[in-house]
Image: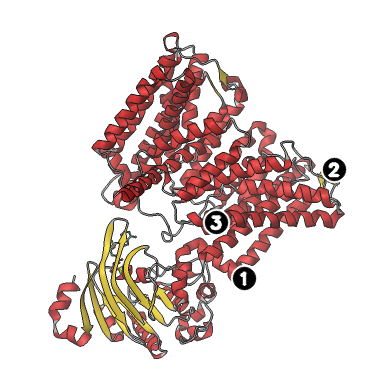
Amino acid sequence: MLEIDGLTARYGRAQILNGVSLTLGDNEVVALLGRNGAGKSTTMKSVMGLVRQTGGSIRHDGQEIRGRASHTICRAGIGYVPEDRRIFGELTVEENLEVGRRPAREGAPQWTTEHLFQLFPNLAERRRNLGKQLSGGEQQMLTIARTLMGNPSLVLLDEPSEGIAPVIVEQMANVISELKREGLSVLISEQNLHFAREVSDRAYIIEKGTMRYEGKFSDLDANPEISTKYLAV
Amino acid sequence: MGFYLAQLLTGLANASSLFLIASGLSIIFGVTRIVNFAHGSFYMLGAYLAYTLVTTLQGGIPGYWFSVLAAAVLVGGIGLVVEMTILRRIYRAPELFQLVATFGVVLIVQDATLAIWGAEDLLGPRAPGLDRAVRLMGEPIPEYDLALIAIGPAVLAAIWLVFHRTRWGILVRAATQDREMVGALGVNQAWLFSAAFVLGSALAGLGGALQIPREAVSLQMDLSIIGEAFVVVVIGGMGSVTGAFVAAVLISVLNAFAILIFPQISIVLPFVVMAAVLIVRPYGLFGRPGSEHGGTEEPEQPLRLLDQRSTMVLLALVAMLAFSPAVVSDFTTILLVDVMVATLFAVSLHFMMGVGGMVSFGHAAYFGVGAYAAAMAVKVLGWGMLPAMALGPVAAALAALFFGWFCVRLSGVYLAMLTMAAAQILWGVTFQWQDVTGGDDGILGVWPDEWASSDRVYFYLALVLCLGGIWLLRRVAHSPFGYTLRGVRDSRIRAEAIGIDTRFHQWMGFTLAGTLAGLAGVVFVFSKGSVFPDALSIGHSIDGLIMVLLGGIHALAGPVYGAMAMVLIEDWVSRLDYWRFIFGGIILTVVLLAPDGLAGGVRRLIQLVRRDAA
Ligand SMILES: Nc1ncnc2c1ncn2[C@@H]1O[C@H](COP(=O)(O)OP(=O)(O)OP(=O)(O)O)[C@@H](O)[C@H]1O
Ligand SMILES: [Mg+2]
């Protein structure tokens, strides 16, 4: 589904990623773990074509997508949920969803507004409210729903559990399971090990722009020194 | 009573035309972030096209309205061509580059219009069916004004419907907030931008077309409207169409009544209102701070101190310059003084923009204040040249201190607009205050003292003053103050976090840049022997911007290259017919071929040659 190989990225003169490699299989949920500033978001933005100075290769369904414009990457079936949500505050919930709407794509589940309102009942109640009037948790749901409107087959979820209430985190975990059931592949970036373990099949650990670990959560739990070294604060 | 009603209705009719232009400008800015100086040109083209269509069709009422709409559509098409051939290629360049490109379009459109329609003002026909006046409370009101009063809100309603009821409109509103995110959601921004540009230019064209029964169609229409249109957009909040409507009504109605009390006010009133609004609401009445995402600019490259070899080259250049009067003609000597004046002016603007991170659309104000202060010291106070030369920069410093205090409270485009307002106010005062400044006639006969009156001696005086000024700015740029200022430019939040008074530093940077622009003005006035309000005009401020941006904002040598190129090109082409066309073409060529400016272009050329040689 997604193969990243030797990805490098820089902001101006600062080299942020030094050869990141990662693969994500069909219908797999994989966690990308790492501390603050490790390069998780930069990895996702690079896949999405939002960081311009990149090297290495990013293949999606066997096709090289590095260097392509971000709208074509989205149209190829990659959905992106940014960490700071970036909902359109001056648009209503329904209008936010409209911005994300794309035609149906073969081999990916098709989402409708009604279906998404079932998945996120809070949003249904607030469909005519402006984005900026929503709570943090509601905004997080809205960004996910907005991305799903593009009928992606792969979703990049950047820190979905950050800064929201524990009840909503639980709801978020259900949503991710639902996405897997629908046949989607998901890459989640997380600092919350507990949440990541609950929803994903495998994990990668990134530190200072370099991959440090790849494997199952069971192995990670068996070797607590790894998480102490790369994740603990 | 009836008289006041008539005045109010005139104000509202003016508001409608102003709104049409400003709404287009606001939409274009909101989506593409382009400050489109060519918007006035689209307005002018709308008027000319409508004139031609109406007079050739002669089709009565349907013919008139068909012509108006057709002119708007045609101008939309011209907007599409401009967007696709020029602007689309440079969306990733720094925002100001696009501004310079649109100014190139202004110049080209001016000469193209001159070539097609001639220099004579054209008097359009009255609108058929609306060519009389109705009496309201005893006062005659033109029917056409009443029609315009209805058209403004109708267009506002139409735009509102498009923006809220169509997918395209929703995308435009989303892109106004965060265009990068809209792209990540699969929307091809290029087409969204083109469409916004077409709609915006068509609205400008419509505004111009509807104007033909009210004013003569002339080549001055473009720049006469653009300042006011910017003001309306800024007061309303950039990107807000409703804001543009409210602001247009506010300005026009205020103006309709203010001229009853103080007839000279119309030139400065919009700018005074804008300054007042921006101080209370830094993003305009309906504006919001833009998203921090979606900026396309690369992070600023640090300015480097010159290495040894560049220092040698520079010293050699200065030495060549110093010995040049011995070899070249007097005429060239005078031209070289022009180059030095332009260079100091450009370097002072570069200090403010490149080091201070404050873009100015009104830097010529301080140049002009310096020049006028010196000229008035000679003419009114009877001072000698040297004391007058000392007074100029002091006056410029005081003006910069005063206006800078307001400007540094804002940032980005809003700051730039406030500097333009300040310049426009000073220009208006100079222009109107006939008794003291001579108004349009300027101040004549400001010559150097006897000892400095030969071209050669004055050349050396200019050399010392200009090089001294440039040297001072360079020193300051690399002093602790300069580093702090750059820190503020790169991250205001971080600078504030470590306890720096960011506003104070910017204020002082603003003042220093203004002072040295004043010095350039002083050298200028004694070399020309006269000064006119032009020295403070927006046009002159834009010259400064072009010099800095064409030279390249990231390089220390940028403004030097830019000023040299500008003066020499101007000296060469302004003797030709259609020089604006040529000059605009040169600007566009540089913008498209060397988006990092001449300095960057030269650097890349050298690299290319080296690589080939290796
Ligand atoms: N726009 C930018 N310009 C310059 N540097 C940046 C920019 N964005 C991020 N960085 C730097 O890049 C590094 C990696 O950032 P990134 O956002 O990828 O980290 P992250 O793993 O997502 O961290 P977090 O958990 O805080 O979200 C950080 O050191 C950060 O300071
Ligand atoms: Mg992050």
Q: Looking at the image, in which quadrant does ligand 2 appear?
A: bottom left
Q: Which mark is residue B166?
A: 1
Q: Which mark is residue B301?
A: none
Residue pointed to by mark 2: B138
Q: What element carries label 3?
A: loop
Question: What percent of the width, then of the height, locates residue B332?
Answer: 47, 22
Question: What's the residue at 59%, 71% (across, down)?
Answer: B167
Question: What's the residue at 48%, 63% (across, down)?
Answer: B179
The quarter of the image holding the N terminus of chain A is bottom left
Query: Quick one: label 1 or label 3, which is nearer the N terminus?
Result: 1
**Amino acid type of disc 1?**
Thr
- Whether callout 3 and callout 2 share a subunit is answered yes
Q: Is mark 1 on a helix, strand or loop?
A: loop
Q: Which chain carries label 2?
A: B
Q: Mark 1 lies on which chain?
A: B
Disc 3 and disc 2: Cα gap in Å?
A: 41 Å
| Residue B368 in the figure: left or right of residue A187 | right
Label 2 or label 1, whichever lies nearer to me, is 1
**Amino acid type of disc 2?**
Gly
Disc 1 and disc 3: Cα gap in Å?
A: 18 Å
| Residue A79 in the figure: left or right of residue A191 | right
| Tag 3–tag 2 contact (CB < 8 Å) | no
Q: Nearer the viewer, residue B111 or B208?
A: B111
Q: Mark 3 lies on which chain?
A: B
Q: In this view, does B591 lie above or below B449?
A: below
| Residue B464 in the figure: left or right of residue B57 | left
Question: What percent of the width, then of the height, locates residue B547?
Answer: 46, 38
Instruction: Single out the residue that lies furthest toward the front.
Output: B613
Q: Quadrant of residue B264?
A: top right
The quarter of the image holding the C terminus of chain A is bottom left
Q: Which mark is residue B239?
A: 3
